[in-house]
Image (cartoon, grey):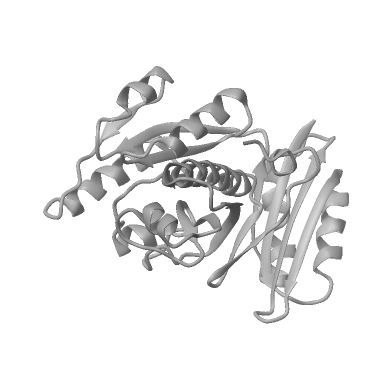
Amino acid sequence: MSKYALTVTCPSTRGIVAAIANYMAEQGCNITDSAQFDDMETGQFFMRISFDSQEGATIAALNDGFTDTAASFGMTYSFHDESEKMKVIIMVSRFGHCLNDLLYRVRIGALPIEIVAVISNHMDYQKVVVNNDIPFHCIKVTKDNKPQAEAAIMQVVEDTGAELIVLARYMQILSDEMCQKMSGRIINIHHSFLPSFKGANPYKQAFERGVKLIGATSHYVTADLDEGPIIEQDIVRITHAQSPEDYVSLGRDVESQVLARAIHAHIHRRTFLNGNKTVVFPASPGSFASERMG
């Protein structure tokens, strides 16, 4: 039995859900999970459904047959085979906690993606990556060769057919051109403190100010540094008895968890860009989000 997902975005109006449900029934498909959101501020409608096809309908056939329905509502839509793993490129610099966490989750099946390459501007994690049978590319980046470096990165994207880039603590700023070209297909992770600290040694700054909350934010990358649409966030509490080293350890742990959850939402097509924000539908019971693996 084939299992698929359908994602839909369109202007809000009456009859959308009924039209989709009727089409699914006509194609011999059974809806197993459904989530929708009507944004009253933007007038946009978002929907994601999971369904199975007992009659063996193909993605191509479903897509072709849905054209008229989609046109009548001005839909942007896509059908996906839920058994197909998304091809992902991970980019990392010298902090390896997120990379190692993702490699482990993929290995145990908690994160169903195909890592087609790891790109770094340093050689620190070459052995780790190669030992996981994943191609490793060291692409040095300087202020003088940035356009050439990004061209090399995009060549890897093209050669591998990657659908998503994950910045797992990649400490280089991407150009506006690359951000626009890969809009909605680059996910980043960074710490978030209350209050906020930037620059060198943010955890030391947080310790010196007696911060009680350390958080992490995962978001889509845009030309505005660390200001893209947010996908996932979380926090961990700190006490006065903890050391600067504890701050770093706890911070890395929450960063790893938040990034993994953001990727999980994206690869299952539960995230929708909505202007400067996102719509993120919750996962169904028994999935990664409810397990909250650490």
The location of residue 130, given as percent across then percent down, is 36, 21
Q: Position of residue 46 (x, y in %)?
A: 70, 65
Residue sitting at 33 percent across and 29 percent down?
125
Q: Is residue 94 above or below residue 193?
A: above
For the point 61% across and 43% down, the residue is: 264
Q: Position of residue 111 (x, y in %)?
A: 60, 34
Q: Nearer the viewer, residue 215 or 161?
A: 215
The quarter of the picture where the C terminus appears is: top right
Residue 275 placement, left or right of 26: left
- Above or below, comparing residue 151 to residue 99 in the picture: below
Residue 171 appears in view: yes
Give the left or right position of residue 66, taking residue 125 as reference.
Answer: right
Q: Is residue 58 visible?
A: no
Q: Is residue 16 above or below residue 153?
A: below
Q: In terms of image quadrants, where is residue 69?
A: bottom right
Residues 91 and 74: in front is 91
Q: Quadrant of residue 53?
A: top right
At x 85% / y 57%, what residue is drawn? 21
The N terminus - image quarter: top right
